Image: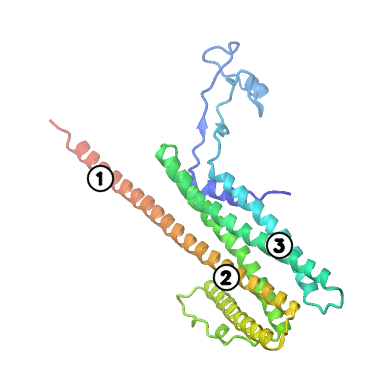
Amino acid sequence: MWRDRTNLYISYRQSFAHHPTKKPRYFGPSQGAFTDSPSLSEERRGLIAGADGLEDDGDAVIEMDLLPPRWVDIQEEVSEVLADIAQKSARLDKLHQKHILPSFGDEGAQKEEEAIIEQYTQEITRGFHACQNAIQRIDGLVREQKQLGAVTKGDETMAKNIQISLAARVQESSARFRKKQSTYLRKLRELEGMASPFERVSTPIQSQYSDPSLMESDADKSFSQTTLQQTSQKHQQQQQQLIVGGVNDVAIAQREREINDIAKGIIELSDIFRELQTMIIDQGTMLDRIDYNVERMATDVKQADTELKVVSLHFTSFPPE
């Protein structure tokens, strides 16, 4: 399995200024103190320095001895969890397609299939929670490094960039899975003959200030909450029928439990989506403030430089007696 390093590379590029260091020239004893033979220099030039580490032609050297910040490990952790979620989600799609087909087999096999579906669903949902917690840990790591005085402004900016990037990736993946779960929930409702909830239609009116993705997430959450209410009412009716006529359908009860579990999972995913959206907005606002301060500082430096030039010109034109 390969790992995508694009986001990490971009965060480094955005966070650090590129000022390559130069190592001092060193001339071997055969060259003398003030000689610099081009032919000998070309012969001894290579991609790898000499064993003593002193021979160098003065070109820029990229420092590779610094360890990356600890929150870079969180990026790899989240990437691995998302890859695992993608694999399990693909398997779950096949199980969903098979499960909604008319079944004429034994109930034992169907229950086993439902158990596998429930297991995959819970594992995927826990994976999204793990990603969310991992992203939130970055703030704690930054604060810890600040207290130790071991974090630079560039490190802090890079951490914010990584947080926004990871939150967007997890948000996109969770939204994709939530939509699949909502589609599966509607199909299960149709199999149970449940009426379509009118609350699903009464979603907030979209405006230019509304986020369509958040509106869709809230609509799925509202749809799932209504489903829970309907299944609860249906369960109460079945309990009354059981008391009156002794009717007890185990298959119906099992399907209702499955519907409830999926609806609760969709509500969890909607909450995760909204929290990640809040994190993206907050961190983005903070980065805007940092960029503003940097631009303001650059303006002040230019203004100070102009004033110094004016003063220097004044003293040049009118030297003190």
Residue named by callout 1 = 307
Residue count near mark 1 (Cα–Cα under 10 Å), binned few <14, some 14–19, many ≥20: few
- Is residue 256 or residue 265 the one in the foreground? 256
Can residue 179 be seen here? The reply is: no
Residue named by callout 3 = 119
How much space separates mark 2 and mark 3, taking CA atoms?
17 Å
Label 2's element? helix
Mark 2 vs 3, N-terminal side: 3
> Residue 30: which quarter of the image?
top right
Give amino acid for label 3.
Answer: Gln
Mark 2 vs 1, N-terminal side: 2
Give the residue displayed 86% in from the left and 78% down from the top.
104
How much space separates mark 1 and mark 3, taking CA atoms?
70 Å
* Image x and y of residue 73, in percent: 58, 44
Which label number is shown at residue 267?
2
Residue 229 to residue 305: above or below: below
* Image x and y of residue 261, in percent: 64, 70
Mark 1 vs 3, N-terminal side: 3
- Is residue 35 or residue 24 the one in the foreground? 24
Label 3's element? helix
- Is residue 83 or residue 95 the one in the foreground? 95
